[in-house]
Image: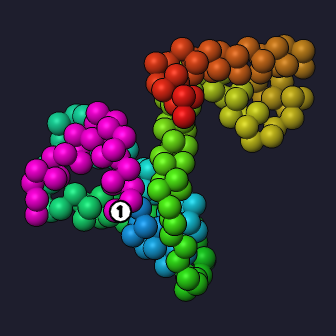
Amino acid sequence: MNVTTNTEYVRGIVENDLSVLKTIYRESLPEVIKYVRRNSGTQDDGKDVFQEGILVIFRKASEGNLELTTSFHNFLFSICKRIWLKKLRKISGKEVPFDEVLEYSSEEDLEEAFLKSQKWELFNKRFMDLSEECRQVLKMLFNKVSGKEIAEKMGYTEDYAKRKKYKCKQSLADLIKSDPIYKHLTKK
């Protein structure tokens, strides 16, 4: 176990160091995807689980609750494994496919996946900054609930529901665009 390397990986996650994060993706993501695919999941499920694993490490390290007793990659893999097993428990009756594992074939795929995850993280962070009312309206909108149904569920008139959807979408867009990370993500 290389303690210096473990420390560098954790620091890279906390400080959002792109070169360290690319290394983590390159070295650990294929193994996570392989595991998830062998256990009833898809490549996209593997990517999602991997992102959640990175976020768990980020949160623990940011709170000072992270103590590695194994290699970083083993630790990350075990977190991802637990996350996937938890998700599988929620999905009942799904058969385990044994088809070939598709892995990332190039550095560009890794970079694209990382950028996508950062954008998603920014969206979620700013979404939580909205009022509870706006979050409810937008969740229904994202789930393709009709304007009429949104109005009924929220106790609005249809015209007010239309204006509310617009205002909430605009508020979310403004929050995202005002975040310092937004400029960094749109440069790529």
On screen, residue 51 above or below 1: above
Residue drawn at (43%, 73%) of the image: 35
Label 1 sits on what residue type?
Ser
Q: Nearer the viewer, residue 25 or 107?
A: 107
Q: Residue 145 falls in which quadrant of the image?
A: top right
Which stretch did the figure color magenta?
A: 1-27
* Image location of residue 59, percent across then percent down: 30, 39
* Residue at left offset 30%, top offset 58%: 76
Q: Is 43 situated left or right of 15 in this image?
A: right
State whether residue 46 appears in this view: yes
| Viewport quadrant of the C terminus | top right
Q: Is residue 152 magenta?
A: no
Quadrant holding the N terminus: bottom left
Residue 138 x/y as whole percent: 70, 29
Report the magenta stretch's main SS: helix
| Percent of width and height locating residue 144 | 80, 40
In-front residue for pair 168/28: 28
Asked if the magenta segment contains residue 16, the reply would be yes
Give the class, few, some or many, for how many residues have Cα within 10 Å of label 1's Cα (few <14, many ≥20). Answer: some
Residue 8 lies in what quarter of the image? top left
Circle 1 SS class: helix
Residue matched to label 1: 28
Q: Nearer the viewer, residue 51 or 7?
A: 7
Whether residue 45 sits left or right of residue 24 in the image: it is right
Asked if residue 90 can be seen in this view, the reply is no
Furthest residue in direction bottom, as rendered: 98
What residue lies at 55% left-to-right and 73% top-to-bottom? 102
Q: Position of residue 178 (x, y in %)?
A: 54, 14
Query: Which scheme is used to colour this image of the protein?
Result: rainbow
* Residue shown at the point (68%, 34%) measured from the top left: 139
Is 62 on the left-hand or right-hand side of 129?
A: left
